[in-house]
Amino acid sequence: MADDDTGGDATPFELPPGRAASIRDVARVAGVSYQTVSRVVNDHPSIRPETKQRVLDAMEQLQYRPNRAARMLVTSRSKTFGILTSNRHHYGPATSIRAIEEAAQESGYSVVTKNLTATDDASIVQALDHLADQAVEGLVIIAPQVRVLTAIERLSLRVPYVTLQSTGEAGSHALSIDQVAGARLVTRHLIELGHRSIYHLAGPQDWIEAEARMRGFLAEMSDNDVPTTAPILGDWTADFGYRAGRELLRFRDFTAIFSSNDQMALGLLHAVREAGLDCPRDISIVGFDDIPEAAHFAPPLTTIRQDFAEIGRRCVALLFAQLEGRDADLPAIEPTLLVRSSTARPAF
């Protein structure tokens, strides 16, 4: 097929001050259609050499730099996935994001990440607009606050998307490691050691993982007829774990604590040690996530391992399945209990 060069002479043209050149500006200067400019950008074989040179000259004159959106005029494919996240610096999300990038790259795709600095509706819409400007073909949402996912559902996204969350409410769009099962595993471990006075240091109230881990803890305690106290709502930080530990140790009416993540468990260990007590002889402590440092805490931390890298790879597999209109047969990823030195039988 021949190119659709209009055959006209290049049109004198000057850009308004402060405005970048568009593909239509290039077409006007080169005297061709914007489809021809797009074919030149994408190195289409049907373009005559003299037409191609006119377009290249116009691009140089206007200092036009083709972007992904321009390439989509012909290909309808940006070969780009987007990630919307609100906690990219945390170990779990950071590991999953790295795995997504690697898996996408292996398939010839790139990844653009947008981090939410706030989780109100306006900020979410602005972040999604930014990703839309990159012409993403699929989206991974790693923003585990309930309000973010609620806003996403209201927006009715038109591209394939995957959410990393554990409610199961997003159906075929959801991927997660079973947080409830992980919490039950680690709570059962403490109960089987003989603990009956177990506190739960939970994560922030609006976080889906925190709520799921709390449910798992309460369900396992109930199933074993172990009395519970109200979980303590934390903020995921070691500082909070330390402060909570100091306050709890004023009464010391427990023999074990299940911390909803490893960082808060680290703070708890600090508080126990500072009080002149020993973990696990006096108090057993368990965490969740198995961050790389958990094996080197003092003592090494009993925790739940989540395969964040595998879940990142599965995000990409699920996006491709949605793009291709097929079902993805992905077996469940189960959490794993790692028993280390921070737990022992209570010293009655």
Image (cartoon, grey):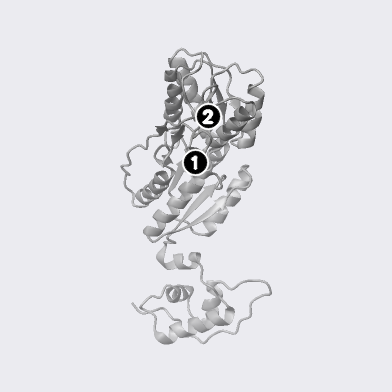
- Of callouts 2 and 1, the N-terminal one: 2
The secondary element bearing badge 1 is classed as loop
Crowd rating for badge 1 (residues with CA inside 10 Å; few <14, some 14–19, many 20+): many
Question: Is residue 136 in view from this perspective?
Answer: yes
Of tags 2 and 1, the one toward the viewer is 1
Q: Does the image show residue 31?
A: no
Please name the amino acid that badge 1 sits on.
Answer: Ile
Above or below residue 141? Residue 232 is above
The N terminus lies in quadrant: bottom left
Looking at the image, which residue is at 48% across and 79% down?
32
Name the residue rendered at 51%, 16% in the picture. Answer: 347
Vertical order, 10 against 74 (above or below):
below
Residue at 54% x, 37% y is 150
Q: Does residue 158 appear left or right of residue 325 in this picture?
A: right
- Between residue 180 and residue 185, name the one nearer to us: 185
Q: Is residue 133 left or right of residue 159?
A: right
Q: Which residue is identified by label 1?
A: 291
Quarter of the image for residue 270 reads top right
Picture coordinates of residue 175 (x, y %)? 42, 40
Residue 167, how many percent across, how many down?
A: 46, 32
Label number found at residue 211 = 2
In the rendered image, residue 70, in percent from the top left (x then y), is placed at 49, 68
Q: Which mark is residue 329?
A: none
Quadrant housing residue 49: bottom left
Q: CA distance from mark 2 to mark 1?
A: 20 Å
- Say if mark 2 contacts mark 1, CB within 8 Å: no
